[in-house]
Image: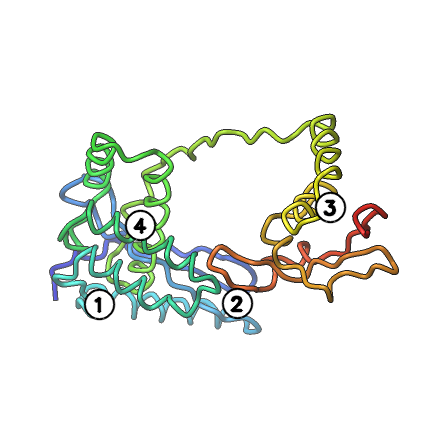
Amino acid sequence: MSTRPRVVGNGSVYQVKEGVFQYRFNLGKDPKTGKYAYSSKRTLHCEGVSRRTQQAMLRKALEEYKEELNSGIVRDSGNLTVVKYAEDFHSLRIKSFKSPLAYAREGNYISHIQEMFGHIRLADLHPDDIRRIYADARKRGMSEAELHGTHVKLRQILQDAVDNELILRNPCTPIKLPKPTYRERAPLTADEASRFLSCLMDEPLSAKATGTMLLLQCGLRRGEMLGLTWGDIDLGRRTLSVSNQFTNDKTLRAPKSKMSRRTIAINDSLAR
């Protein structure tokens, strides 16, 4: 077990809602940063009992947590590195992703974390270290968008370490990176879309021309257009139903949200 700062005071209690409380302890000043450190919050549920019983339950919970902190029973991260924890975090989440591409994107951020944080121990990582590493990454040419995405993923991983009581606080919390600004897309104007549609109507009938007409006239996304089957089209009612999408990993799956599932009217020219 590593040496941990002893608890200062009797703990702080916050009422989340009726019968639900969160509590934590002040662990004194961090010797490196000079800032106060706090234990991770714990939650006590005591709904449906009297206030006197709630107070007794809180006293007992605080006493047990204080004893746990002072005795060092809280899980110790030991020599566990940031990189190793990030790799384990990623590998354990493979079944939680519906899209292989989303899992691969997280893998890209894990690769950045591997490169940037090397073998820094989880318990040794401080906000100043992260700021310095980010500054070095910018000098090496990392874009603000990629850096922001990596920071969001690192913050998520370190919060998981806090929840697992391997570290007392998330060193990413005081670091604020502005969201990157992306170049605004320039859609076709109504006149441009009309001229484009006229040109398509003069083209020989083909799958590409029909697909482009669906995008223009129905406002479909590319994956929604590619996910259409003959069963989604009702020529008699002049409608088509969006119930699937064809993703970049060449998989047919349901749209992400219920709002994306919809029925759209089509005109006679498109129905022909």
Residue 138 x %, y %: 25, 32
Q: Amino acid at mark 3?
A: Cys
Left or right relative to 240: residue 129:
left
Residue 163: percent from left, percent from top: 34, 62
Q: Which residue is mark 2?
A: 51
Tell me which numbered mark, 2 or 4, is placed earlier along the sequence: 2
| Distance in Å between CA atoms under marks 3 and 2 | 60 Å
How far, Cα to Cα, is label 3 from label 1?
56 Å
- Residue 139 is situated, as x and y percent measured from the top left of the image, at 21, 30
Q: Which mark is residue 44?
A: none
Mark 4 lies on residue: 154
The residue carrying pointer 3 sits among few (fewer than 14), some (14 to 19) or many (20 or more) residues within 10 Å by Cα, namely some
Mark 1 residue crowding within 10 angstroms, few (<14) / some (14–19) / many (20+): few
Residue name at image x 74 percent, y 26 percent: 191
Q: Are marks 4 and 3 in contact (CB under 8 Å)?
A: no
What secondary structure is marked by label 1? Answer: loop
Residue at (49%, 55%) from the top-left corner? 248
Q: Nearer the viewer, mark 2 or mark 4?
A: 4
Camera-side residue: 110 or 217? 217
Q: Which residue is mark 3?
A: 218
Crowd tier of the residue under label 4, counting other residues whose Cα lies within 10 Å: few below 14, some 14–19, many 20 or above? many
Foreground: disc 1 or disc 2? 1
User: Are the residues at dot 1 and dot 4 in contact (C-beta closer than 8 Å)?
Assistant: no
Residue identifier under label 1: 75
* Residue nearest the observer in this picture, 221 or 115: 221
Q: What's the residue type where badge 2 is placed? A: Arg
Label 2 with label 4: CB-CB less than 8 Å: no
Earlier along the polypeptide chain: callout 1 or callout 4? 1
- Do we see residue 10 in this rendering? no
Is residue 49 among what the camera can see? yes
Comparing 98 with 248, the one in front is 248
Spatial CA distance of label 1 from label 4 is 20 Å
